[in-house]
Image: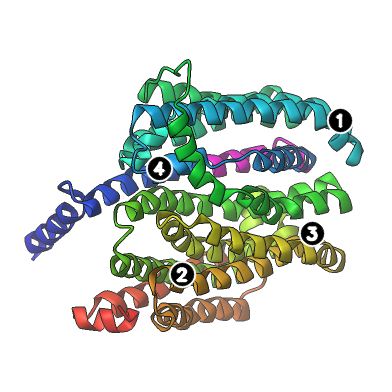
Amino acid sequence: MAFRVYEKIERTVAGLFGGDTLKAKTFRGGAWLGSGSFLEQASRFGRNMLLTRMLAPEAFGTMVLVTSATSALGSLLDVGAREALIQNPKGHEESHVGATWWITFGRSLSLYFFLFLLAPLVARAYENSELTILFRVSGIGLLFEGVISPRAYAAIKQLNLRKWATINHGGGIAGVVITVILSFFIRDVWALVLGFIAENAARCLLSYLFSPFLPPLRWDRTAMRDLLKFSRGLYGLSPLSIIYMRTDIFVLGKLFSPAALGLYVMAVTSIQTPTGFLINIMGQTMFPTFTHIQDDKARMNRILLKVTAAVFFLGLPILVFLFFCSHFLLTLAYGYRYGAAAGALFLAGCAALLNVANGPITSIIYARGFPQLHRRCVATMAILMILLIYPCAKWFGPVGGQLACVISMAGGYLSQVERIRQVTGLELSRYKKSIVLSGVISLSVFGACLIARAVMTLRQPVLSVLIGIVGCAVAYGIAYAILFGGTRNRVESVLGL
């Protein structure tokens, strides 16, 4: 029996990862990205656990203002050169690779110039003179980011994701290590700023080591126009994305102290770290995968339904777990001060689940060559965020920032689900089935945590967290039994495939 089980596993693994089929390339690339992203995100989480005990919350609040303002300015000059290179059928050609380098280099140089000039104005707005020098120094990291070898992006198009995982996640891990070392000598926000620069510098260096490239002295005008043609569909998308993702930081930074902002940021980052892990894997594997089958709508829909089912089967039990155990998790991870941000942690989980579920739809829209449709989704989110953030923050405090994020994300996600029907002809009734079933299965986690609350006091965080984990394990076991315990027809019936 053991031998038969081993043979079955071996055949399954060989079927998924062996050969040169699109499916095998996607799974191999996903395995590399998953491993690299897991190591990077785990190292970031470990870094945060250490730094919250070494640096004051004010340091994290100040740093997030720097990165948010920098991202906001960068979004105004974003032309989507990387996405254009991956989507373009000629993205592997020398002319297009060279044109991409000139586009990204010119963008980063312009970005630093404007950042240098505007830094004093931002510092005056937040009544913190130190922000001027922090902005100007951190901008060096953006210069390193702008000159990354474009052959690394071409490797994504060719599904050579092993190379990209080494460059991207290797640079991230190097930045984490350098930040931790610096924090032993510099006990303030400068450790975070210098670590940010080191991270981008490491990625730049690794990109030329693993994807050698010599920038051309001149760019190909035809290739430049070809790339910018796709970019026109992306115009305005980055600023709208930044409005949704960073408005809470700007408003909360103005209404509350840097310490309160620091507590909020660390709670939200605790969710965004694993979410970033999933979104990076899904985006960097599914986008190039969908570009290879961009004319096969039925196949795209089958993949979308399966991935969506997996997202909600995994995500909803965790969401219930966070509802009961957010305070305990933050206390155990960062210390008792951070437990006050438990509400922000749970709401960040809600927004993250919708964001992950939205990712495959976005990849299909990009692969089909209609980025303007995604821009409408992000515009919806940005408008809702602008309307909701200030009243939510005034009424509910810092946690109101994430409440506004959840409502905005829900609006954008629902609008994008509606639009995917126009792009691929997806039947929405099939899309809804797995979400409803996932909600029913999540009741097992709700029951386990509710029983734990009834028989224990709130002074037992470790035991409460363990019971919540057991509840999630039970939910996953039920999901596995429903999806894979019967025949093929039963599985297809449950998912509506």
Between the residue at mark 1 and the residue at mark 3, the CA separation in whole angstroms equals 26 Å
Check if residue 45 falls in the magenta segment.
yes
Mark 2 in CB contact with mark 3 (< 8 angstroms): no
Q: Earlier in the sequence, mark 4 or mark 3?
A: 4
Between circles 2 and 3, the one closer to the viewer is: 2
- Which mark, residue 3? none
Between the residue at mark 4 and the residue at mark 3, the CA separation in whole angstroms equals 39 Å
Between the residue at mark 1 and the residue at mark 4, the CA separation in whole angstroms equals 37 Å
- Which mark, residue 120? 1
Q: Is residue 72 above or below residue 323?
A: above
Check if residue 296 falls in the magenta segment.
no
Q: Which residues are magenta?
A: 42-57
- Could you say which is closer to the camera, residue 400 or residue 136? 136
* Amino acid on which the number 4 mark rests in the picture: Ile
Q: Is residue 213 left or right of residue 114?
A: left
Between the residue at mark 1 and the residue at mark 2, the CA separation in whole angstroms equals 44 Å
Q: Earlier in the sequence, mark 1 or mark 4?
A: 4
Residue 15 picture location, percent across and down: 16, 56
